[in-house]
Amino acid sequence: MACILIVEDDAGFQPGWLQHLEPRGHEIVMVATAEEALEVATEKTFDLAVIDLILPGMDGAELIRQLRKDEATCGITIVAFTCMLRQMGLGFDARDRVWLPADEVLDKTEGIEAVAIKIEALLMGSSLRGKMNRGPEANRDDLAKE
Amino acid sequence: MPAIYITATGRNAGKTTIALGLLAALEERGYSTQYFKPVGQHFCEQDGQLADSDVWLCREATCSLTEAETMSPVIIPAGFVSAYLSDPKPLALREKIIAAAECLSLKADVLVVEGTGHAGVGSCLDLSNAAVASMLGASVLMVVPGGVGRSLDEVSLNMRFFEGCGVSLVGVVVNKVFKEKYERVTSSLACGLERLGTRLIGAIPYEPALSFPTMDQIRLELDAAVLSGQDMLQNVVENTIVAAMTAQNALRYLTRGTLVITPGDRVDNILMAISADGSQSTRGRRKIAGVVLTGGLMPHVTIMPLLKNAGFPVLLSQHDTYTVSSCISQRVFKINPGDSGKIASARSFVRDYVDLDAILSSIGVGSTG
């Protein structure tokens, strides 16, 4: 189970997130603006954040940059969620991380169900990475406990 | 061995341009050459070798396989002069230079040596240009910037310094002469130099394109991040505008190859650059060479796809607009190893405007051309 922050201002999408992620056992915190997201991110620890790029007030890319700058939130797996790039026929690669330091950019036009499956895969990947990053000593301890 | 020592009356006169041209012209005439920069102040490391930036340029331009450190035996890092003055060892530095010159001499008919600054530069290390030229037994070719009175005054001053070290002067090349004044400047200079006891052996017209920077040079200078257009960093900047005005007014200042400097939150000017670039300039060159966004201000996310689609690179600088524009306007952008167009221009300038025979006969090499 993971704690997921969803930053989505579109009321039409909000129920979809809950419908597809909550049954998988995740705790979902939903906010509608970047400002609210920054506030809640200081109060709670999240494993993953799904951030719509076009938001009222501060935009989603700026929110991601701010989360990356903060020591407390820089390690969250971040998924940017947008239809902009696809609509303009543009891709996203490592060079774009200067302005959009997200782990993944997912296409909003794919629909929430498809995106939710990708998020699940990302969560599994980050959990695996977390274990590996703990190094061989930590793994040995785990084995010893078993 | 025959050696020509290229010196100047000051910084940025065009010594390296002349050196590039001379190396090519000599090779064209069948002479093998080696470039040598005995004392360097602006150095960088490549492939584990530390050498003067001009060495890296000339080495690549001539496809030389000589060790860069041999071509650049003495470099002056920060604090070097103070350390030297507290414990001067002039012999050690001189031996380094002589040993490198001997090594290069084995590989060439003619050594093309580039000094640093005016005749006296390096005196603090007992390695003035005049002292080094004397040590190498080289004859001096002096490069002066376009002009008459000031150039003659400076040649006169520098000549005295070289004469004091027993170094002979081949003559003077005047560089960056405005085309509309070319005839007047060259004839006056020729007269004036003759009165000083030397001669004019080349007059190169001013070519602004030689000092146009690429967007990549701007990026390095500002230590800026690339937001988009990574593969267009070789765009050449011919004109710079600070778009701190409204977009409709900034439009009036756009010419071919313009660099637009604007705060990152000035969406109007960013959109102006994108739309103006859409209307292609004449002669196939784009109107916008690139954009520098200042203040570390990132544009709104909705603008980013437009920038990614634009036909120019976009840089993000953490500096404010004034600092960025001052930095670019004050900087003299030198020729880079990758600037094949500029290197070709330097070569053709020397071939077309410098009396190579006069140089060759002065250093005791017969003309084979």
Image (cartoon, coloured by chain):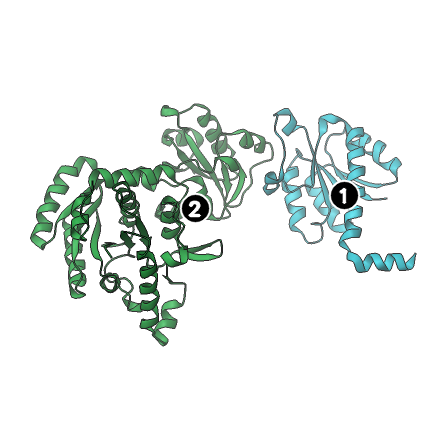
Q: Secondary structure at mark 2?
A: helix
What's the chain of the residue with tag 2?
A: B
Residue B331: image location, x then y, percent: 36, 48
Position of the C terminus of chain B by quadrant: top left
Q: Is residue B46 visible?
A: yes
Residue A33: image location, x then y, percent: 70, 38
Identify which residue is drawn at 72% across, 49% down. Answer: A75
On screen, B38 above or below B249? Answer: below
Q: Is residue A4 visible?
A: no
- Say which of B24 and B76 sits in front: B24
Q: What residue is shown with label 2?
A: B324
Residue A41: image location, x then y, percent: 74, 47
Q: What residue is shown with label 1?
A: A48
Query: Which amino acid type is marked by label 1?
Result: Leu
On screen, B122 above or below B311? Answer: below
Write down the colour of chain A: cyan
Write down the colour of chain B: green
Position of the N terminus of chain B by quadrant: bottom left
Circle 1 packing at 10 Å, graded few (<14), some (14-19), many (20+), is many
State the image quarter where residue A63 is shown: top right
- Say which of B31 and B189 sits in front: B31
- Have a look at marks 2 and 1 and say if they share a chain: no
- Say which of B118 and B22 sits in front: B22
Identify which residue is drawn at 34% across, 47% down. Answer: B332
Residue B275 — which label?
Answer: none
- Say which of B336 and B137 sits in front: B137
Query: Which amino acid type is marked by label 2?
Result: Val
